[in-house]
Amino acid sequence: MTIYQNLIAGEWTGADAVENINPSDTKEVVGLYASGSATDTNNAIAAAKAAFPAWSRSGIWERHVILKKAGDEIMARKDELGALLAREEGKTLPEAIGETIRASQIFEFFAGEALRLAGEVVPSVRPNIGVEITREPLGVIGIITPWNFPIAIPAWKIAPALCYGNTIVFKPAELVPGCSWAIVDILNRAGLPKGVLNLVMGKGSIVGQTMLDSPDLAGITFTGSVGTGKRVALSSIEHNRKIQLEMGGKNPMVILDDADLSVAVEAAANSAFFSTGQRCTASSRLIVTEGIHDRFVQAMTEKLKTLNVDHALKTGTHIGPVVDERQLKTDTDYIEIGKKEGAKLAFGGELISRDTPGFYLQPTLFTEATNQMRISREEIFGPVASVIRVKDYEEALAVANDTPFGLSSGIATTSLKHATHFKRNAEAGMVMVNLPTAGVDFHVPFGGRKASSYGSREQGKYAAEFFTTVKTAYTLA
Ligand code: UN1
């Protein structure tokens, strides 16, 4: 089997490789991917540093053309890349193709943004002096991405980094190197100068740690666990480095008595179980008022019976496998914890076997949960959700906000009054009314509050906050 190598200083390199395994069929090796060393990582950082002066002064048309080419190629290959994504991560083929289209759209968006870079010219408070305010690229950016969105999250960090003139050392999650390799290959062929974008696949403990220890990274943008995010933060203070962290969620979905039941069930089932619940925007706490509680639980369990858990590439699959054995163990451990804490298992909870050996788990719904239980406070990152019964809207809002996290918060209601109040008072970076908490647009800000996020927003025009630094220049006329 050929080895998909790392890209360092414009050269494909690396002989040590690991297998990329398909979670829908653990007998299938998706490919062999290089596993980089500390030396590889340091070489990549040095290459990015050497490439920065020229790239930071490159023309905006050159950046536009490269980003546009990449977006176009990703779109043209959406079925093939979507299938690769589904094979390495386990989300269903339609979800994977949708994510691939999103990645293409992100490149198209930032191709456009490259042509719209602008600053401000303002008068000084002193006579005969002019003031210019401009944005300059930050320098070498470290990009560390998680396994759950193998193409969209790399795209939404790489595209703005390049658009604003930064160079990159990119470390994708070890579980899903395939899509990352593909987009680096696409960008490399699209004409990026050597060293502007370096790919170092491999272990967090080696590649990631070497990045954290480097004084030469001006910024790190990271999506992943709270624990690793904290380590990124602490090491970055020492190096006076800018950071952008997207970490966990324990997102609430409030369902009020006046909700349209089918809208509520669609939004809750999608948020909690699609993409196998493996989204930091998933809702795992369904906070339901008394008057609709029993009808909602009944309709949810009916809905769950109709969802097929199976091989990600199989037509008709609604929920693919869990990503790997370790995540499956976390999920089943939390199911046991939920039972011990006294929540009632209303649906699922069991492993299932299919034609191929994979990590298949039923969508799992607890009822009679309280907001104090561990299953309500800790992020599980699997197809497991709990229903928490509350008296009224006021209690629902209080429970929704009573969490260490603050990424996305949803409400199902037909009341304009409650929807408006919730939008203003939900302690989250994103609020969804009559929509799933997960599934976001690519052109508007993404991010959260509290333990979910740190630093400025990702995506859309707001991405410039992280990927640039502001300069104020005064000139005597
Ligand atoms: C989405 O819900 O469409 O890791 C995106 C995550 C998020 C992305 C969610 N950063 O789940």
Image (tube, helix red, strand yellow):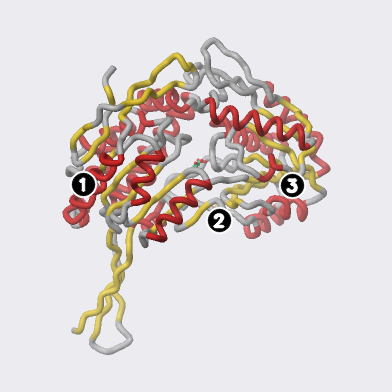
Labelled disc at residue 372? 3
The first of marks 3 and 1 along the sequence is 1
How far from the left and from the top, in percent, is residue 145? 41, 41
The first of marks 1 and 2 along the sequence is 1
Q: Which residue is mark 2?
A: 449
| Helix, strand or loop under label 3 | loop
Residue type beneath disc 1: Ala
Q: CA distance from mark 2 to mark 3?
A: 20 Å
How far from the left and from the top, in percent, is residue 15? 25, 27
Q: Nearer the viewer, mark 1 or mark 2?
A: 1
Q: Quadrant of the C terminus?
A: bottom left
Tell me: 441 left or right of 382. Answer: left
Q: Are the residues at dot 2 and dot 3 in contact (C-beta closer than 8 Å)?
A: no
Query: Residue 205, located in which quarter of the rendered image?
Result: top left
Q: Which residue is mark 1?
A: 47
| Residue for point 79% across, 43% down | 389
Q: Quadrant of the N terminus?
A: top left
